[in-house]
Image (cartoon, helix red, strand yellow):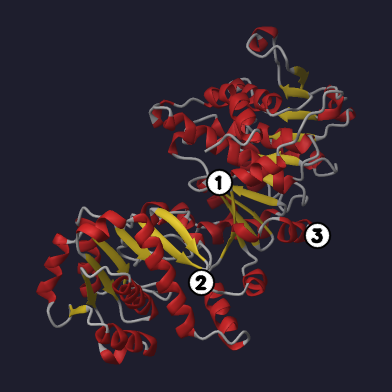
Amino acid sequence: MQSLWQSYYNAHWGKMRLTTIKQSQEIERLTQEVYGISGELLMESAGTLASRELIQSYFPELKKGTAYIICGPGNNGGDGLVLARHLHSASYRNIVVMTLSRPEKSSELFKTQLKRAELSRIKIISLLEQPEKMEQLKSASIIVDALFGIGLSAGLEESYLKAVDMMNSVKVPVVSLDVPSGLDADQGVALNATVKASMTLSFGLAKPGFFVGDGPSAVGKLRVLSIGFPYECLRRVATTHFAFTDKLARRYLPSRGEKTNKSDHGHVLVLAGSPDMRGAGILSALSAYRMGAGYVTWASEGLNISELESAPELLCKNINDKDLLSKEYTAIVIGPGFGVNENTKDWIEKLKTLKTPVVLDADAITTCVDYNLFPLPDNWVVTPHAGELSRITGEDAHHIENNRYEAALEAVKITGGFVLFKGFRTLLANKNRVMVVLSGNSALAKAGTGDVLSGMIAALMAQDVEPLQAAATACYIHGRMADEWIRVGNDKQSLLASDLTNHLPQLMSRLRGGALV
């Protein structure tokens, strides 16, 4: 799979890279030591570009009121001081800088920028010396959060907590520089409190924590500013975390020529739906058809005609037919409503002897854990939610949700193949790399939606889409349907799994035509 990932690097993944805290620090080190671009120059660039973005996005607030810039003692505070100076140079005079820094704990670059701001005659208030002045924030028209960036490793101290609480309580736009103060930039967890920004201006690349956990509610609108890190430096270091959006989903969605027939679009086998859980099999099989598979065979125990009235397109087999695997299927789903038992174990062991790509879901995941069937072939896609991932790794679900990226990568080591860790946001991991799929919401937290997703993934694999691409594309479309369900005015609680299957045709058409917004 290394060549597949490498092709992504070369073709189109440059703009979709994310950078962890350690990678950000390494990029900055290489930029300074190898390329000779000083930290001071990077800070000047960051503050300059941030000031331009602020003017473009919040011109009325800057023009009519007072901008307060809250600066911490490190380089993030230095970025804020540069921003203040450039706003002042652009004729915005109603600027107040509030600092929360002691000289002995301040970075050298912060001290340098503080002197420059003082020489520019910008109003500067030390909140450590005059804590009562923090009440002035209530009269602000806009606030810039420059307390802490990626360097924060522990919870905020009391004086900083008060500043964060005040920023969150004032009903004006709050713009965070690089990272909302208090947010773990890798895991998206609030260390003990975090700024809830209206907009975050991230320097260089976006951070993984922006998209999971507390990240989305803390970041607000995201703008990524290119402050001068060399492209080759970014490409060399930022190699583990990526984002998957509609542009990539459109790229991987297979096309259908006018002269093709059903045999050209694959045959999906769905092993799902025990007698008391037929719906899981129907949902998975029908979604595979909707996603473009030419044939779909649903295999279960004791199927009868009355159960197929709502799905006459399905080919049906008894799970006990000896010739069930005599056909050459191009993708297989196993698990939705299939039961956790010896029969499921036997089927998984049979499928492991084939070269066919498999989607392993629901009961099949639990069966693999109970019967110690891991690792699996490297072209299988395992689709656990947090509870199932907890059974795979042995970590409790709360720990997993607070460490989503690490948990997904750890699961890969155990299961083999690809791990699609469902939830907000869904992650797709393989070896030491992980993607976050930028669609979906809590409307999907309902029985049956995962069955629909498993069928969608298998349908794309059946049409010769690589497992990585198929899982990410299906997951993006799956989540996007839930997003649009809410966008048109429906309540989150009202979505049914069958609604996804019914809305899939229109969304696929709009995605293929580039009409998604």
Looking at numbered disc 1 in the image, what kind of residue is underneath it? Glu
Cα separation between marks 1 and 3: 30 Å
The residue under the point 65% across, 46% down is 248
Label 1 or label 2, whichever lies nearer to me, is: 2
Quarter of the image for residue 112 reads bottom left
Question: Which tag, 2 or 3, sits closer to the chain's start?
Answer: 3
Image position of 336 with respect to 11: above or below? above
Residue 176: percent from the left, percent from the top?
Answer: 35, 64
Instruction: Work out how far the residue at label 2 is from the one at label 3, CA to CA, in angstroms.
Output: 31 Å
Circle 3: element type: helix
| Residue 199 horizontal side relative to residue 34, left or right | left
Q: 87 and 253: which one is in front? A: 87
- The circle on residue 3 is 3
Q: Is residue 479 above or below residue 174?
A: above
SS at circle 2: loop
Kindly identify which residue carries mark 1.
Answer: 388
Residue contact between numbered discs 1 and 3, judged by CB atoms under 8 Å: no
261 vs 276, left or right, is right
Badge 1 marks a residue whose secondary structure is: helix
Q: Residues within 10 Å of mark 2 (few under 14, many from 20)?
A: many
Mark nearest the camera among 1 and 3 is: 3
Q: Residue at the spot x=34%, y=67% of the render?
A: 181
In this rendering, would 276 be left or right of 9? left
Is the C-beta separation of discs 2 and 3 under 8 Å? no
The location of residue 285, given as percent across then percent down, is 68, 25
Quarter that holds the N terminus: bottom right
**Residue located at (73% from left, 15% from top):** 313
- Looking at the image, tell me whether mark 1 or mark 3 is earlier in sequence order: 3
Mark number displayed over residue 227: 2
Q: Residue furthest front?
A: 91
Where is residue 110? Give x, y as percent.
35, 85
